[in-house]
Image: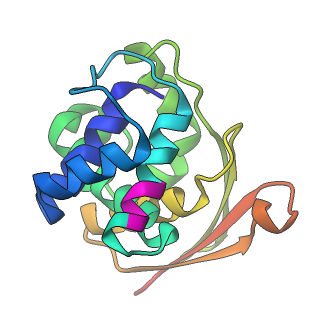
Amino acid sequence: MYGLVNQAIQGLVIDNFGSDNWNKIKQKAGVAEEAFLSNEIYDDSITFNLAISASEILDIPLSDVLKTFGKYWIIKVGNEKYGPLMKSGGDNFIDFIVNLPNFHSRVMLIYSDIKPPEFIVEKATASKLMLHYYSTRQGLTDFMFGLIQGLGELYNTPINVALVADRRNGDEHDIFEIDIIQ
C-alpha cells in the first residue's frame, strides 16, 4: 500500500491516542521507519501489522480499529487532502456510492500503481443500495464498512450499513446493504 495509508494510521492514532501510543504501536508492529513517504509503496504487511498492533496496544477490537480508520480516512484524509477528488465523486451520498465503480479510475491518475478494489452498485429501492465489494486484499471488510459510514457523515446522510455477504465466511465477495434513513 502507498505510504499515505500508513501516514493516515499514524494520524488517527496520534490525533486520538497520542504520540506515545503511536511509538508503542510502531515498536510492537516491528516498523523501523521514522516517517512514511506518501507516494512510496510499502508492503501490505506493514499496514496490517500496524492495525493489529493498534488493536492490542489500545485494547480495541481489530474490527473497531479498521472501522474507525475507514471513517477517519474519509473525513480527515479524503476530505481534507483530496477535497476536489472527493467532490468529483458526487454531490451527495447516493451519487458518490453510485459513482464508486469509476472513482478509483480517477485515483489511478494520481497513484498509478494502486491495486484498487472493484464495486458493483445495485439500487434495491429509492433508499436502499447494495454495494458489492471485490478486493484482491484480504482483511479490509471492516475498513470498507468504516469508509461507507464516513461517507454518510461527510454527506450528512444518516445511514444504516449491514454486511449481508462476507468473504470471511466463505462468500465470493462482500456485499453491504446500505439503508438511507429518511
Quarter of the image with the C terminus is bottom left
The chief SS type of the magenta part is helix
Residue 87 visible to an observer of this rendering: no
Please name whichever residue, 32 or 39, is drawn nearer the observer in this view of the structure. 32
Please name whichever residue, 134 or 54, is drawn nearer the observer in this view of the structure. 54
Q: Position of residue 43 (x, y in %)?
A: 53, 26
Q: Position of residue 46 (x, y in %)?
A: 47, 36
Is the residue 61 above or below the residue 50 in the image? below
Left or right placement of residue 141 versus residue 77 in this view: right
Q: Residue at x 78, y 60 (%)?
A: 167
Q: Position of residue 165 (x, y in %)?
A: 77, 69
Left or right placement of residue 156 versus residue 103 in this view: left
The quadrant in which residue 71 appears is: bottom left
Give the residue at the far bottom of this rendering. 182
Q: Position of residue 121 (x, y in %)?
A: 65, 54
What span is in magenta? Answer: 52-56
Q: Is 164 a magenta residue?
A: no
Q: Residue at x 46, y 23 (%)?
A: 42
Q: Residue at x 29, y 22 (%)?
A: 38
Left or right placement of residue 100 versus residue 37 in this view: right
